[in-house]
Amino acid sequence: MGNLLNPGKAAAAAAAKQRQEQAVANDRQLAELRAQDADSGASRRNPRGRRLFVTDASSKNTLS
């Protein structure tokens, strides 16, 4: 019963491995998208957050 509530090092290692594999998959997907965009002449940049949707970011105090 204790193993169900506290999986221990094995679960932590599996979660870390999954996060690492997901990061690699995300990087590969982004590289593929950028390669496709390079072929089409478009550009893809990293998102900068919700401030993109505000006309004057300096006048807005909160991002809600």
Image: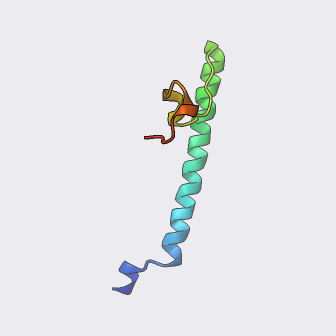
Question: In the visual, does 62 lie left or right of 41?
Answer: left
Question: In the visual, does 53 lie left or right of 35?
Answer: left
Residue found 50% across the figure and 28% down from its top? 54
Furthest toward the top, the residue is 41
Image spot of residue 8 (x, y percent): 49, 79
Give the quarter of the image for residue 38.
top right
Q: Quadrant of the N terminus?
A: bottom left
Image spot of residue 57 (x, y percent): 56, 31
Looking at the image, which is closer to me, 16 or 43? 43
Question: In the visual, does 24 lie left or right of 62?
Answer: right
Residue found 42% across the figure and 80% down from its top? 6
Q: Is residue 23 above or below residue 58?
A: below
Q: In this view, does 41 lie above or below 64?
A: above
Residue found 51% across the figure and 40% down from its top? 61
Residue found 55% across the figure and 56% down from its top? 19
Looking at the image, which is closer to me, 57 or 5? 57
Give the quarter of the image for residue 39.
top right
Q: In which quarter of the image is the C terminus?
A: top left
Give the quarter of the image for residue 27.
top right
